């Protein structure tokens, strides 16, 4: 689910023009549900457009998620796709929203270059999108946002040659504090990656224990990383892993800093793009979890699927995939 954004819409066409900017992409074949707290939107969530026969199942998930949002009083529905499907899913969401005590602010469908109100035969041309809103649409659709960045082949080759094995990663950790490396990666943007550091990070992302320490640190800061690393070492000696740290991986507890998660996702996407095929799994799984933690289930699903295509038994990728399949978002996605 996306973050709260203030858009002043004086008429339906203004509202429709703003929806892609809320998501960061132009949705296609999608159901977009926009929760409201009074007169204000509180983010947006996208679902694949179901067939008419599956409209009720999607409606149950959508309305149920809105009900979990603190302070939500209503919702709007925008369906991108064939009108019969739009009517079916919008009616189902309306029925379930009423049962939950939520008002339905408005229901739209968008098909081709036109839009209309569900239940109304009139069709209007899509409005022109203001420049400041168009600039917020950074991906062509919900799928392209998960494409890995392009990297220089020469750097990828350097990374592959520098990739340490089990012994190498242990030796590397004698010279490099993993927590410092995790923290430093938050400033990586793809133009400032050094091959040895990238290779060491890729190797660490393929060690579940270190990867999970990184995810906790990226979510809650350096001190949390220290606690997670100490807990991991103690766990290997038979001590129970602390519940409050395990909760982070399950999407429970305090809300992470979204800016840190965004920066970590940028780093992991570049690591996955640089890694040899057999070493992509760890960075892809980390990218899947980070996307899920940011409320981007579509992207999380794509990253986890790519990882599972390489290693069908990969644990974190299976977990994130199961979360997405069940329509499960982290609890902190519903707090502000």
Image (tube, helix red, strand yellow):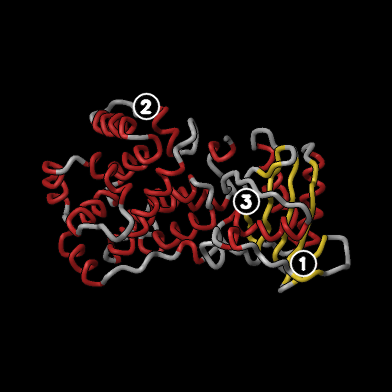
Q: Are the two marked residues, 1 and 3, in contact with CB atoms closer than 8 angstroms? A: no
State the CA–CA distance, disc 1 to disc 3.
Answer: 19 Å
x, y percent for residue 31: 68, 58
Density class for disc 2 (Cα within 10 Å; few <14, some 14-19, many ≥20) is: few
State the CA–CA distance, disc 2 to disc 3.
Answer: 32 Å
Tell how many labels: 3
- Between marks 1 and 3 in the image, the one whose residue lies nearer the viewer: 1
Q: Residue at x 48, y 45 (%)?
A: 293
State the CA–CA distance, disc 1 to disc 2.
Answer: 51 Å
Quadrant of residue 242 within the rendered picture: top left
Q: Is residue 120 above or below residue 265?
A: below
- In the rendered structure, the answer to whether residue 157 lies left or right of residue 219 reads left
x, y percent for residue 235: 28, 30
Q: Nearer the viewer, residue 28 or 24?
A: 24
Residue at the spot of label 3: 45
x, y percent for residue 130: 64, 62
x, y percent for residue 161: 16, 64
Residue at the spot of label 2: 242
Find residue 51 and name its label: none
């Amino acid at each position: 689910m996306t973050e709260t954004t203030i858009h002043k819409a004086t008429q339906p066409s203004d509202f429709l023009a703003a929806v892609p900017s809320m998501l960061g992409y132009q949705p296609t074949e999608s159901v977009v549900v926009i929760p409201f707290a009074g007169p204000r939107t509180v983010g947006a969530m996208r679902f694949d457009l179901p067939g008419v026969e599956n409209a009720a199942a999607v409606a149950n998930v959508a309305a149920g998620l809105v009900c979990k949002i603190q302070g939500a009083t209503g919702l709007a529905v925008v369906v991108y796709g064939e009108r019969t499907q739009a009517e079916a899913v919008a009616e189902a969401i309306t029925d379930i929203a009423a049962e939950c005590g939520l008002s339905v602010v408005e229901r739209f469908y968008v098909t081709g270059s036109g839009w209309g109100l569900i239940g109304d035969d009139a069709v209007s041309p899509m409005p022109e999108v203001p420049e400041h809103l168009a600039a917020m649409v950074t991906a062509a659709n919900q799928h392209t946002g998960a494409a890995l960045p392009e990297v220089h082949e020469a750097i990828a080759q350097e990374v592959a040659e520098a990739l340490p094995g089990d012994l190498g990663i242990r030796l590397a950790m004698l010279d490099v504090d993993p927590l410092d490396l995790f923290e430093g990666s938050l400033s990586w943007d793809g133009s400032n990656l050094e091959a040895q550091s990238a290779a060491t990070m890729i190797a660490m992302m393929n060690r579940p224990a270190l990867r999970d320490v990184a995810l906790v640190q990226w979510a809650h800061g350096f001190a949390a990383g220290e606690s997670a690393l100490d807990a991991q070492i103690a766990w290997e000696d038979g001590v129970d892993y602390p519940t409050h740290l395990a909760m982070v991986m399950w999407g429970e507890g305090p809300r992470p800093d979204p800016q840190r998660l965004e920066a970590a996702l940028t780093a992991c996407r570049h690591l996955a793009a640089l890694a040899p095929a057999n070493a992509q799994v760890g960075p892809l799984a980390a990218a899947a979890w980070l996307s899920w933690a940011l409320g981007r289930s579509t992207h999380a699903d794509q990253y986890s699927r790519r990882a599972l295509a390489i290693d069908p038994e990969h644990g974190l990728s299976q977990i994130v995939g199961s979360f997405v399949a069940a329509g499960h978002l982290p609890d902190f996605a519903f707090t502000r």
